[in-house]
Image (spheres, helix red, strand yellow):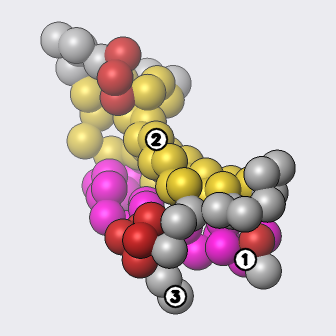
């Protein structure tokens, strides 16, 4: 499986968005909207979108969800979501 770095070097556009859950709430919100809020260390979601370099309208998205019983891991979320997106492109 290719990494995000390898895909970007090959000309693919890769976008990664992380979502986290607020404390005492299972609502996942984007990280850029979280300023001064208390986060739950468990649960979350990562979305990876991959756009083909030559085919303008070819885009695939993969999602990885973290149970609120598991600690959130950005690295694991990116790897799972990227794997799912690449399956759609092939």
Which residue appears at 32% of the width and 56% of the height? 74
Does residue 69 appear left or right of residue 80 in this picture?
A: left
Give percent across and percent down for residue 31.
Answer: 35, 29
Q: How crowded is the residue under tag 3: few (<14 C-alpha within 10 Å), some, or many (20+)? A: few
Q: Which residues are magenta?
A: 68-88
Q: CA distance from mark 1 to mark 2?
A: 19 Å
The disc label shown at residue 87, or none = 1
What is the CA distance from the residue labelled 2 to the residue labelled 3? Answer: 20 Å
Give the percent coordinates (x, y) of residue 79.
Answer: 45, 71
According to the picture, the residue beneath numbered tag 2 turns out to be 17
Does label 2 or label 3 sit earlier along the sequence? 3
Q: Give how far across and how far down residue 46 sits, in percent.
A: 48, 49
Which one is in front, 10 or 69?
10
Q: Nearer the viewer, residue 60 or 81?
A: 60
Q: Quadrant of residue 88?
A: bottom right
The answer to whether one can see residue 21 in this image is no
Q: Which mark is residue 1?
A: 3
Which numbered disc flags the more N-terminal residue, 1 or 3? 3
The image shows residue 86, relative to residue 2, as above or below, that is: above
Q: Secondary structure at mark 3?
A: loop
């Amino acid at each position: 499986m290719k990494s995000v770095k390898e895909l970007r070097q090959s000309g693919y556009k890769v976008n990664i968005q992380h979502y986290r859950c607020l404390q005492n709430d299972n609502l996942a919100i984007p990280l850029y909207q979280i300023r001064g809020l208390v986060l739950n260390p468990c649960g979350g979601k990562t979305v990876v979108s991959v756009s083909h370099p030559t085919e303008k309208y070819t885009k695939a998205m993969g999602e990885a969800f973290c149970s609120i019983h598991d600690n959130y891991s950005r690295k694991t979320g990116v790897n799972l979501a990227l794997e799912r997106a690449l399956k759609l492109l092939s």
